[in-house]
Amino acid sequence: MTGFVTRFAPSPTGYLHLGHAFSALVVNAAARKADGVMALRVEDIDQTRCRPEFEQAIYDDLSWLCLEWPKPVRRQSDHFDDYRAALQVLIDKALVYRCFKTRKEIADEIARAPHLARSGPEGPQYSGAALPPDEEAARVEAGEAYAWRLSMAAARDHLGTNYKLLSFCEETKRGAVERPATPEIFGDAVIARKDAGTSYHLASVHDDALQGVTHVIRGEDLAAAAHLHCLLQRLLGYLTPVYRHHRLITGDDGQRLAKRNRSATLHALREAGVDPSEVRAQLGF
Ligand code: GLU
């Protein structure tokens, strides 16, 4: 066994489809090739969309595909305190600010200044600032909901010349490339959502560090996230893993598979008595 640790980190917001199977098989093959470990992590911070039957189906689908992983599985919903503590590190360094704005307010603000509007990986780039302390305290006191956003300006100031030196290693088919990180493409990213007290970004980098992940292997739809994750790792004092991004599986219509496309779910294939080795073979395994 080597020190190679990677992970498959699905969210139980629907049944897994062939795209997830491909991802899990790619991650598993990389772990086997390196004589390492594939951890399974359930990313269920969105308690309004995650459901127990989808979580159970993750275990059943992956077992059906003959995959194995160390137990116990880390379920993010059991660890909100950990993410709160990581957020506190950023609060203490004044790198995040409370944002009370609704999506609509942000959209209206951007519409009023279209010449400044830029689009990032998660929609329009937004940058704001903390409210004056009195106003902020009054709105917190009144129980108004807020998100925490990472201030890119504060992060830049905090890191000084090191900001420009941020980079991560991406392993591609043509070899390893050191990529300069450009987290500013996200604008002031939401680090703790109004409804969840954390975000995918914060929980994911926290857990990758905690679980000793050396290689993050995931779909190319998340390639941009590495830029922000690299910054968060630096700010939180975590090591930056190596990144690999695999291609996405598309349906017959050439479109990316989505959880709402029911026919392609692994659950449906399993129920229909499909042989899992056929699925593995179809995906090139
Ligand atoms: N939970 C994410 C998803 O299901 C994956 C995140 C990751 O691999 O970093 O899309």
Image: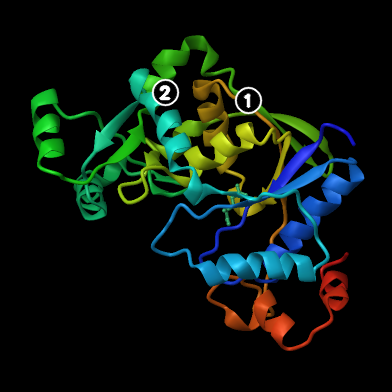
Specify the quadrant that holds the C terminus.
bottom right
Is disc 1 placed on a helix, strand or loop? strand
**Residue beneath the point at 84% across and 47% down:** 30
The vertical placement of 56 against 104, above or below, is: below
Kind of residue at disc 1: Ser
Closer to the camera, 50 or 21?
50
Structural crowding at the residue carrying mark 1, measured as other residues with C-alpha within 10 Å and reported as few (<14), some (14–19) or many (≥20) = some
Closer to the camera, 18 or 51?
51
Residue 67 found in image quarter: bottom right
On the image, the x and y values in percent for residue 214 come to: 73, 33
On the image, the x and y values in percent for residue 86 come to: 45, 30
Residue that extends furthest to the top in the rendered view of this protein: 161
Number of the front mark, 1 or 2: 2
Which residue bears the numbered disc 1?
A: 167
Is disc 2 placed on a helix, strand or loop? helix
Residue that extends furthest to the bottom in the rendered view of this protein: 272
> In the image, is 95 to the left or to the right of 169?
left
Q: CA distance from mark 1 to mark 2?
A: 22 Å
> In the image, is 185 to the left or to the right of 16?
left
> In the image, is 231 to the left or to the right of 3?
left
Which residue bears the numbered disc 2?
A: 89
On the image, the x and y values in percent for residue 240 come to: 65, 28
* Visible residue check, residue 14: no
Structural crowding at the residue carrying mark 2, measured as other residues with C-alpha within 10 Å and reported as few (<14), some (14–19) or many (≥20) = some
Kind of residue at disc 2: Val
On the image, the x and y values in percent for residue 100 come to: 21, 42
